[in-house]
Image (cartoon, helix red, strand yellow):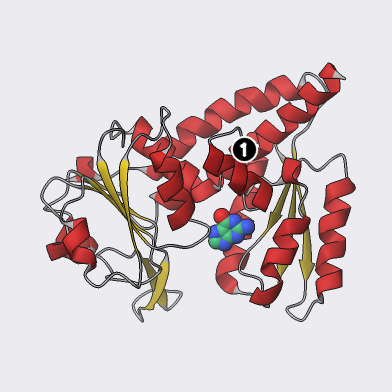
């Protein structure tokens, strides 16, 4: 049964070892990749993601700095930190943890990030480049899913992938990347969302299902065809008095019902989550390499 599990931790560990080699090559040229983190407010989930990202940086040799602002921080306070990171040569990548307490500021804050330091791949410049199939910093969760599928032998090429969820961070960029004609894409894609009358009609025709709706049990057993590959992006906290923290993490898929039917499935936690963090490291190392390239070329 266990061999059905797509082990995001193992694939991440493999990729992080590859990144360590690239970091060592940069350090031999006196370059230390640097990530600047901004956390606004004290949402416990955001805090724990940021801590995990900073620990992962340390593990591969990336320098990280963090600024925390209170939940009532003004737009100017937030933009001032972004601009500080934009002009700091020690910082190659900028991570503004989302969601911001005031969601209305989000697009302005993202647009203020220097596209060359946009290691989340969220700025309009990088999203546009991605859509066109040009070199770009790709958003970490979709990019991590593509690498996970490829490295686990479940290439999406020529397959029908049904993505459930249309967020700017996961569903829509993933659907877009999967359609590109390259080594990680070349799939036929259906994108379902809350406006889709019957999501099961679509998922039952899928070779690969990606659940990124942010709601437990969005994908039930009867929505999954025999032999499908299931990628569960959901990280939902559900109350569980038997756990020391009072909650447990579940995905968007009914895992127990899915397991007997699938060819492969990602666990939650330990599936997509570690890949997201690894791709942030990947983009930060790439950003540092590109600074060096630009300096050498000029
Ligand atoms: N919030 C949830 N996922 C992400 C992510 O990949 N990057 C940032 N910055 N915030 C997030």
Q: Residues within 10 Å of mark 1 (few under 14, many from 20)?
A: many
Please name the residue that numbered disc 1 is placed on. Answer: 136
Q: Could you tell me residue 10's position as x and y percent?
A: 40, 38
Seen at 43% across and 62% down, the residue is 166
Q: Could you tell me residue 240's position as x and y percent?
A: 35, 78
Q: Could you tell me residue 201's position as x and y percent?
A: 17, 62
Seen at 70% across and 38% down, the residue is 62
- Seen in the picture, residue 47 relative to 17 is either above or below; the reply is below
Locate the C terminus by quadrant: top right
Q: Quadrant of ligand 1?
A: bottom right
For mark 1, give the secondary structure: loop
Seen at 77% across and 19% down, the residue is 28
Residue 170 falls left or right of residue 42: left
Q: Is residue 65 visible?
A: yes
Q: Quadrant of residue 184?
A: top left
Q: Quadrant of residue 18?
A: top right
Farthest-out residue, front: 132
- Seen in the picture, residue 103 relative to 120 is either above or below; the reply is below
- Nearer to us in this view, 120 or 108: 108
Q: Quadrant of residue 73?
A: bottom right
- Seen in the picture, residue 34 relative to 171 is either above or below; the reply is above
- Seen in the picture, residue 289 relative to 33 is either above or below; the reply is above
Residue 42 falls left or right of residue 293: left
Q: Could you tell me residue 173's position as x and y percent?
A: 48, 50
């Amino acid at each position: 049964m266990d061999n059905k599990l797509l082990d995001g931790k193992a694939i991440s560990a493999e990729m992080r070892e590859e990144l360590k080699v690239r970091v060592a090559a940069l350090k031999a040229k006196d370059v230390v990749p640097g990530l600047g983190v901004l956390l606004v407010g004290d949402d416990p989930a955001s805090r724990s993601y940021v801590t995990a990202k900073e620990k992962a940086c340390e593990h591969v040799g990336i320098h990280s700095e963090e600024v925390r602002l209170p939940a009532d921080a003004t737009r100017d306070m937030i933009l001032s930190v972004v601009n500080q990171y934009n002009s700091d040569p020690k910082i190659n990548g900028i991570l503004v943890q989302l969601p911001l307490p005031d969601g209305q500021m989000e697009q302005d804050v993202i647009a203020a990030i220097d596209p060359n330091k946009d290691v989340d791949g969220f700025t309009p410049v990088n999203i546009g480049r991605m859509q066109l199939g040009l070199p770009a910093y790709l958003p970490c969760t979709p990019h991590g899913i593509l690498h996970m599928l490829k490295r686990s032998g479940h290439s999406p090429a020529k397959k029908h992938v049904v993505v459930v969820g249309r967020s700017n961070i996961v569903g829509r960029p993933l659907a877009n990347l999967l359609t590109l004609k390259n080594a990680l894409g070349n799939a036929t894609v259906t994108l379902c969302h809350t406006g889709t009358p019957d999501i099961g009609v679509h998922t039952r025709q899928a070779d690969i299902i990606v659940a990124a709706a942010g709601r437990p049990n969005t994908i039930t057993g009867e929505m999954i065809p025999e032999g499908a590959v299931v990628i569960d992006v959901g990280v939902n906290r559900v109350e569980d008095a038997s756990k020391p923290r009072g909650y447990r993490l579940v995905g968007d898929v009914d895992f127990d019902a899915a397991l007997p039917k699938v060819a492969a499935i990602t666990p939650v936690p330990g599936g997509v989550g570690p890949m997201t963090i690894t791709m942030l490291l990947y983009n930060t190392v790439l950003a540092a390499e590109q600074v060096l390239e630009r300096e050498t070329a000029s």
